[in-house]
Image: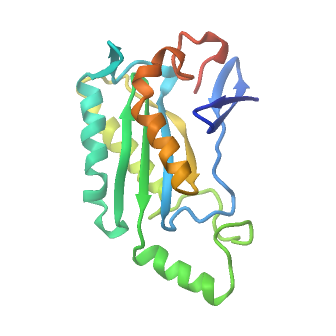
């Protein structure tokens, strides 16, 4: 397994059929519908440059990149019931970083109140309810919906476009963590040469 650092945040990758794929960092017993701040990273399949290129240390979005931007900005508007807020985000040539804030809503409010009644913590492994699998009104459902919308809207532009199947997420713990990730996102284009998702860094292998 390789651990790729993104400014003190590790993305675990394992070798499979001579390609690297991102290992899920989702906590098996964590309730990802609860209110909180999340840092997500989604990559294009095979690290293809579908979104544009870095020119003079700035990201120049192409048509698909602009679709990604539009669909992400629409995310809180089409999910009003989830009380979502968008923080910093950046679209890179072959991947996307964003900070997403899930506020208190009718779904997690009820769940958190029930947890309190039964003395169940949603911050550790005592919350047995949340297992991998189809779920709605949580972080995974938001990412699925976003990826699907982008894919559908890019068919006419490039029918070959595809996301990698997995995504990386990090639960933002405090203001220090938030500030560090915000800085990483906003300066990402300037550090493209050394970016772990830049295919010229061949020692990392291929991410799927």
Residue 48 placement (x, y as % from top left):
44, 19
Q: Position of residue 39 (x, y in %)?
A: 50, 47
Quarter in which the C terminus is drawn: top right
Does the rendering let one see residue 9? yes
Q: Is residue 158 left or right of residue 35?
A: left
Which residue appears at 32% of the width and 38% of the height?
Answer: 150
Q: Nearer the viewer, residue 208 or 32?
A: 32
Q: Nearer the viewer, residue 94 or 54?
A: 54
Q: Residue 147, relative to residue 115: is it above or below? A: above
Q: Quadrant of residue 81?
A: bottom left
Residue 69 in the image: x percent, y percent?
28, 37
Looking at the image, can residue 40 be seen? no
In the picture, measured across the screen, residue 70 lies left or right of residue 135, that is: left
Q: Could you tell me which residue is drawn at 31 percent across and 36 percent down? A: 68
Q: Residue furthest bottom?
A: 117
Taking the spot 49% from the left edge, 26% from the top edge, the residue there is: 45
Tell me the quarter of the image containing the N terminus. Answer: top right
Image side of residue 198 versus residue 155, left or right:
right
């Amino acid at each position: 397994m390789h651990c790729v650092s993104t400014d003190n945040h590790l993305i675990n990758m394992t070798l499979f059929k001579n390609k690297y794929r991102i290992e899920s960092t989702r906590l098996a017993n964590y309730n990802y519908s609860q209110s909180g701040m999340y840092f997500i990273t989604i990559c294009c399949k095979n690290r293809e440059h579908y979104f544009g290129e870095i020119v003079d240390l700035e990201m120049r979005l192409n048509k698909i990149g602009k679709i990604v931007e539009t669909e992400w900005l629409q995310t809180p508007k089409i999910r009003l019931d989830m009380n979502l807020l968008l923080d910093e985000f950046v679209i890179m040539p072959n991947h996307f970083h964003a900070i997403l804030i899930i506020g208190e809503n009718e779904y997690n409010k009820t769940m958190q109140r029930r947890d309190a009644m039964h003395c169940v913590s949603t911050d550790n492994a005592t919350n047995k309810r949340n297992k991998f699998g189809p779920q709605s009104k949580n972080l995974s459902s938001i990412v699925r919906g976003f990826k699907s919308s982008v894919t559908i809207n890019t068919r006419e532009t490039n029918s070959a476009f595809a996301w990698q199947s997995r995504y990386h997420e990090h639960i933002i713990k405090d203001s220090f963590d938030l500030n560090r990730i915000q800085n990483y996102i906003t300066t990402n284009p300037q550090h493209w040469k050394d970016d772990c998702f830049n295919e010229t860094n061949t020692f990392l292998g291929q991410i799927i």
